[in-house]
Image: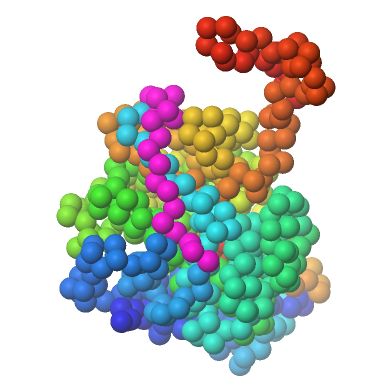
Amino acid sequence: MSITIRIPAQLRTLTGGEGEVPASGSTVAEVLKDLDSSHPGFSDRLFDDTGALRRFVNIFLTDEDVRFLQGLDTPVTEGQTLSIVPAVAGG
Amino acid sequence: MDYVTGLRCRECARPYPAEALHVCDYCFGPLEVVYDYDHLRADLTREAIAAGPSTIWRYAPLLPVVDPAPIDLGTGCTPLVRADRLAAELGLGELWIKNDTANPTGSFKDRVVSVALTKARQLGFKVAACASTGNLANSVAAHAARAGMTSVVFIPHDLEVAKVTATAVYGGNVVAVEGTYDDVNRLCAELASEHPAWAFVNVNIRTYYAEGSKTLAFEVAEQLGWRAPDHVVVPVASGSQLVKVAKGFRELYDVGLLDDEPHVRVSGAQAAGCSPVATAFAEKTDAIRPVKPSTIAKSLAIGNPADGYYALKTVRDSGGAFASVTDDEIIDGIKLLARTEGIFAETAGGVTIATLAKLAAAGIVRSDERVVAYVTGHGLKTVEALTATVGPTTTIAPTMEAFASAVELDPDLDRPDFNRRDP
C-alpha cells in the first residue's frame, strides 16, 4: 500500500523541508518503518527505548487517533493519509 | 527586567531559545520557560507586587514576557471568597472559592491569553489563533480585538450558544469544525505547521500561554496573606492549569515570597463523561487512554489531554486525588454553589464543586485543611445546562389575587412559601 504521511514542522529537517512524503506498508508500524528507511532518523524521534510511541507523539490515520483503532498494528489501505502530530494542550 | 533565560524540554532537558517553540524537536516533549530564580529571589518583594496593578501583571517578573503595556482587559485579582455556608454543607472547615468567573470574558482563560498574545505580539505575530472548547475562543477573540490583531479561532460546531456568540461578537474569524475538541486540536496542530506566521496560543505559543495559569496560585497566596492553602481542587481538561497552579505555589517559595515551604495537596476534578486522567489515577497507571467525550462540561471535554501525564504526577506526588462526577452531579454542584455562596459557575465549575463534595465525603479533602476550590468560568456561558431544572418559582397574572393564591405568607416570619412548580 502506498500512503501519504504528513510531517509536522518539527520533523521536516528529516524530509528536506517536505510537509508530505509517500511511504508504503500494510500496517501503521510498517509504514513508519518504511519512512525511517527513506528518511533516516524518524524511528529515533517517534519511538522510545522500548519501541513504544513516545508519550507526546500522536499518530492519526485519516484523522483518527490510531489509539482508537488498533494502534501500530492498524492496517492501512491505498491512498490513506497518516499524520504525525505532537501533543498540544488546549482548552 | 527580563528574568527568562530560555526554554527547556520538560522530558529530555534539551535547551531552546525563548522563541515561538512549544515542543522539543527531538522527543516532542513540551517546552518549559526557564527563569533566573537567583535574580528573582534577590529582586522580588511583596511590597513591589502590592504596589503593582490590580491585574495578573502585578506578577510580571514571574511571567514569561516583559512589556510595559501588555495586552490586557483587566484580568486577574479576582475575588477569593470565604465560603462558610458551602463548607457547612460539605462538613468542611476553612473553605475558599477562587471566583475566576470575574475575569473580563468570564473565565480564567484571560490569564493565559493576556500572557500569550503579549508574547506573540513581541515575537512579531499579527494573527491570533487557537483551538478552543469555547472559553479560550472568547478570550482570544476579545484580546485580539483589543490589540488590533486578526483572530482565527477554531471551535467544535456543537458548542453552547453563549460561547459562540461571545466569540463572534468581537468581529474575528470563527471556524466551527464538525468534530470534537480533540479533532479541532489535531487540525490546529497540523495547521500550525502550515501557517507559522499565526500565533496559535495553545499550540506554538503554548509554552508562554500556560505560564499565565500560575497567577491562579500567586493571587490565592497573596490573598491569604502570603500563605499557601493546604489543599486545592482544580478542574482538569488538558491538565495544564492544574500543573501550573502547583508550580505557582512552589515558585513563590523558591523566590522567597512565602516564608514556609508549601505542601499543597492538589486534587483534580473531571466529568465522568470525559475522565481519562481520573481513570488512570483510579487504576494506578501512568498510561492515560484517550476517550471520546460525552459530557455537559464541554469546556473540560478533552479526551486526549496533552498534560494529563503531568497532572497525574502532580496530584500523586502532592497526596491529592482525582474524582469524576456525572452530569446530574455537575448540575447539583452548580446549584449548590449558587444557593450557598451566590456564585454562578459554568458546568466546569459544577465539576469542581461536585468533585469537592465527593472528596470531602470520602475524607480526602479534610475539615482541618485550608481548602481552595477553583471556579474558573461563568454560569451565563452554559445556561442551557440548567434551563430544564431551574426557572421561575411560579408564573402568575398581574393581579393581587393571583399572587395571593400562589403564595402563603408565614405571618411570623414574613417569608413567602410558594406552591413550587418546578419546570
Tell me where residue B421 appears, x and y as whole percent: 73, 18
B343 with respect to A19 (left or right)? left
A53 with respect to A22 (left or right)? left
Task: Locate residue B189: give its quadrant.
Answer: bottom right
Q: Residue furthest bottom?
A: A16
Q: Is residue B227 visible in this depiction of the protein?
A: yes
B288 with respect to B90 (left or right)? right
| Quarter of the picture holding the C terminus of chain B | top right
Q: Residue furthest top?
A: B411
Q: Is residue B169 above or below residue B312?
A: below
Tell me where residue B13 appears, x and y as whole percent: 35, 74
Task: Locate residue B294: give its quadrant.
Answer: top right
Q: Nearer the viewer, residue B228 or B296?
A: B228
Q: Nearer the viewer, residue B37 or A9?
A: B37
Q: Is residue B86 magenta?
A: yes
- Range shown magenta: B73-91
Residue sitting at x 56%, y 40%: B344
Q: Is residue B350 magenta?
A: no
Tell me where residue A87 appears, x and y as whole percent: 55, 66
